[in-house]
Each structure stands twice: as structure tokens, then as C-alpha cells.
Image: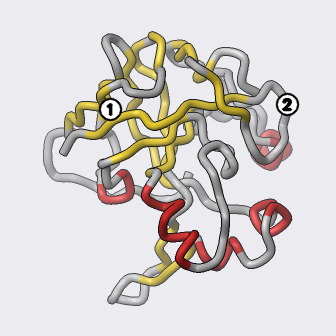
């Protein structure tokens, strides 16, 4: 179950979307160099308000590019970077991977998955009704969050469009991703 990088994005300020760039640099234990969410402790404003000393489990935000096709079918025009992700992937079912999965990206970078992104009200400010479009229900009735996954950088390096992504699962038992 391997994939590839479709696009990469960053934004030095705390705005919803991120601009596409030719390459990002992942910094071990910190996140994306030059991005507003880069740091060892939380950078998301709501989490900083609660406890600024908590570890940053949301250093890198990844979204599966197939989500954009699904949203288009529902009438939403969303492009890579619009949802605030740092890495847009292709050919990889990010949402099905367990906590602790390592994504080996390009030649050196490794992102270890920490959990699911919980979409916030800002998503409806971007496009009205988009929040409900990135949420769903499993056949058991559990809430399904489709707005991407979060991870921490365990090996630094550059990431660019076209880079291969190799998946390394953690040892069993596997635990499904939950909101972080």
C-alpha cells in the first residue's frame, strides 16, 4: 500500500489554506519549516489557548487527493492546499492506517501518524456546507472524519511532488486513528 506526493504546501501565518510550493523541508520533531504550525509544542490556536505546553502531535497535515474528487461530486471545488494540508497524497488510503504508521516520503523523510484531523468551523467559512461533506458515518454509526491525518516528523528531509511514499505499519495490535 504505497502512494506518492501530489503536492506540498505551507503558510507562515494562521490562515485556513496553504499555498502550494515546489518543495517543503520537514524538520525532525518540529514539522514543516516556515509553516505556522511548526514547533515541538502545539501551535493550533485553540490548543495553545488550552495548554501551550502540550506536545505538537499535529506537525504535518496530510490529505488524500482522492478526497477532492469526492467533494467535486458533491458540488464543492476544493484544490490541493485549500484544506490547509502540508502534503497532498495520491494512491494511499490514509484514513485506514493505524496510529504509529510511518510514512517514508522521498529519500529521507519520515512522518509518524498521530491521529485524524478534526475539521473545525473554519471549513464552512471556506465553503458553506463543506464541514458536513468531510464528515460521514461508518456502517456502525461511528463518526467518520475525512479531512486528513496528522503526524509528527521522525526523520528530516525534503518533500516534493512526485516523491514516493512507502508505508511501514507499526507492530500489532493496531489501533485506529482518532482525533488529535
The image position of residue 63, as x and y in percent, is 50, 49
Other residues around mark 2 within 10 Å, as few (<14) / some (14–19) / many (≥20): few
Between discs 1 and 2, the one toward the N terminus? 2
Which corner quadrant of the image does residue 140 belong to? bottom left
Contact between marks 1 and 2 (CB within 8 A): the answer is no
Which corner quadrant of the image does residue 128 belong to? bottom right
What colour scheme has been applied to the protein in the rendered image? secondary structure
The numbered dot on residue 13 is 2
- Quarter containing the N terminus: top left
Horizontal side, residue 60 vs residue 15: left or right: left
Horizontal side, residue 76 vs residue 49: left or right: left
The image position of residue 68, as x and y in percent, is 53, 60
Residue at the location (43% across, 81% down)? 142
Residue 171 drawn above or below residue 177: above
Which residue corresponds to mark 1? 103
Which corner quadrant of the image does residue 31 belong to? top right
Given residues 95 and 170, the one toward you in this image is 95
Residue 142 drawn above or below residue 100: below
Amino acid at each position: 500500500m504505497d502512494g506518492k506526493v501530489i503536492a506540498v504546501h505551507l503558510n507562515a501565518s494562521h490562515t485556513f489554506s496553504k499555498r502550494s510550493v515546489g518543495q517543503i523541508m520537514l524538520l525532525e520533531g518540529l514539522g514543516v519549516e516556515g509553516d505556522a504550525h511548526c514547533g515541538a509544542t502545539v501551535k493550533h490556536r485553540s490548543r495553545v489557548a488550552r495548554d501551550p505546553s502540550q506536545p505538537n502531535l499535529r506537525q504535518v497535515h496530510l490529505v488524500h487527493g482522492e478526497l477532492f474528487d469526492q467533494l467535486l461530486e458533491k458540488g464543492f471545488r476544493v484544490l490541493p492546499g485549500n484544506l490547509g494540508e502540508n502534503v497532498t497524497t495520491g494512491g494511499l488510503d490514509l484514513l485506514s492506517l493505524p496510529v504509529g504508521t510511518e510514512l517514508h516520503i522521498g529519500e529521507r523523510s519520515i512522518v509518524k501518524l498521530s491521529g485524524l484531523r478534526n475539521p473545525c468551523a473554519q471549513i464552512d467559512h471556506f465553503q458553506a456546507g463543506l464541514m458536513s461533506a468531510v464528515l460521514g458515518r461508518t456502517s456502525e454509526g461511528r463518526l467518520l472524519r475525512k479531512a486528513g491525518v496528522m503526524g509528527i516528523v521522525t526523520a528530516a528531509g525534503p518533500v516534493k511532488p512526485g516523491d514516493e511514499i512507502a508505508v511501514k505499519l507499526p507492530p500489532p495490535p493496531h489501533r485506529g486513528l482518532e482525533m488529535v
